[in-house]
Image (cartoon, rainbow, N blue to C red):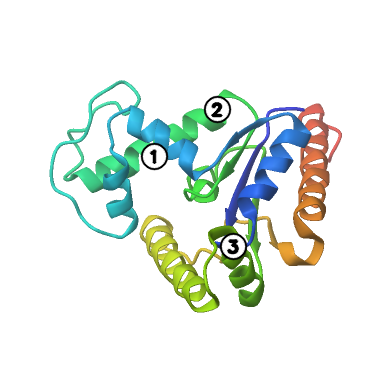
């Protein structure tokens, strides 16, 4: 497959991570979820607890880590801005390296100029999300509702701060999919089919065949 980046934003409990992992496996490309990106960020000097505070919209004073992945930090006023800069840089480097699927981390916005790219947002009805979280986290219905509400607030706040748009907004997205309609396998197959078409169209454009 030609160099294609697939970004998948998703509501918590909509099984976006499982779907993204299957897409990457079936297409034979790299898979980077939130935990993977966070681990890379941690390795270059931004602790996970700092990134969690950034996600919550907390401004953190202090010096950032040093290293070539980030370049000069002198223009950043606080650690919050530096942490965001590191995240953007890492996501861009991952996308430039090879074809991949990237879950979350506002990658759809960060890579909006990347070509070719397929930007997906996966959602599900609240009752489906609650049921999924009850099973995956062994929670009661009330606890699952609260868990999802807190996750939604946290992710929305971070995405809004970085992009100025709602997480589920259609802008900066090519397709919004209700994963409960086709399930994990069916949704993955739909994305894979679209990905192959995007690559095909890109190849035609480069060859001058799509006038």
SS at mark 2 in the image: helix
Could you tell whether 115 is left or right of 201 in the image?
Answer: left
Residue 199 pos. (x, y %): 77, 36
In-front residue for pair 140/14: 140
**Label number found at residue 13:** 3
Could you tell me how many numbered marks the image carries?
3
Tell me where residue 38 sits by quadrant: top left
Residue under label 2, please give it. 96
Q: Secondary structure at mark 1?
A: helix
Task: Pinpoint residue 143: horizontal percent, then vertical percent.
Answer: 47, 73
76 with respect to 209 (left or right): left
* Secondary structure at numbered mark 3: loop
For marks 2 and 3 on the same chain, the one whose residue lies earlier in the sequence: 3
The quarter of the image holding the C terminus is: top right
Q: Kindly give the residue lying farthest to the top in the view shown.
A: 68
Q: Position of residue 108 (x, y in %)?
A: 55, 49
């Amino acid at each position: 497959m030609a160099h294609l980046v697939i970004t998948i934003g998703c509501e918590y409990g909509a099984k976006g991570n499982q779907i993204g992992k299957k897409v990457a496996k079936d297409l034979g490309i790299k898979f980077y979820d939130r935990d993977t990106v966070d681990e890379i960020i941690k390795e270059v000097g931004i602790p996970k607890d700092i990134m969690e505070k950034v996600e919550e919209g907390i401004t953190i004073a202090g010096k950032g880590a040093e290293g070539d992945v980030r370049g000069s930090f002198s223009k950043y006023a606080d650690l919050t801005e530096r942490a965001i800069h590191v995240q953007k840089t890492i996501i861009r480097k991952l996308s430039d390296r090879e074809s991949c699927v990237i879950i979350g981390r506002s990658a759809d916005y960060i890579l909006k100029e990347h070509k070719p790219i397929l930007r997906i947002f996966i959602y599900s009805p609240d009752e489906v999300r609650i049921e999924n979280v009850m099973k995956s986290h062994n929670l009661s219905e009330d606890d699952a509702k609260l868990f999802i509400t807190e996750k939604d607030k946290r992710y929305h706040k971070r995405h809004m701060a970085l992009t100025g748009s709602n997480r589920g907004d259609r802008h900066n997205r090519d397709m919004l999919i209700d994963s409960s309609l086709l399930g994990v396998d069916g949704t993955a197959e739909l994305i894979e089919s679209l990905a192959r078409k995007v690559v095909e169209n890109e190849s035609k454009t480069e060859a001058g065949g799509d006038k």
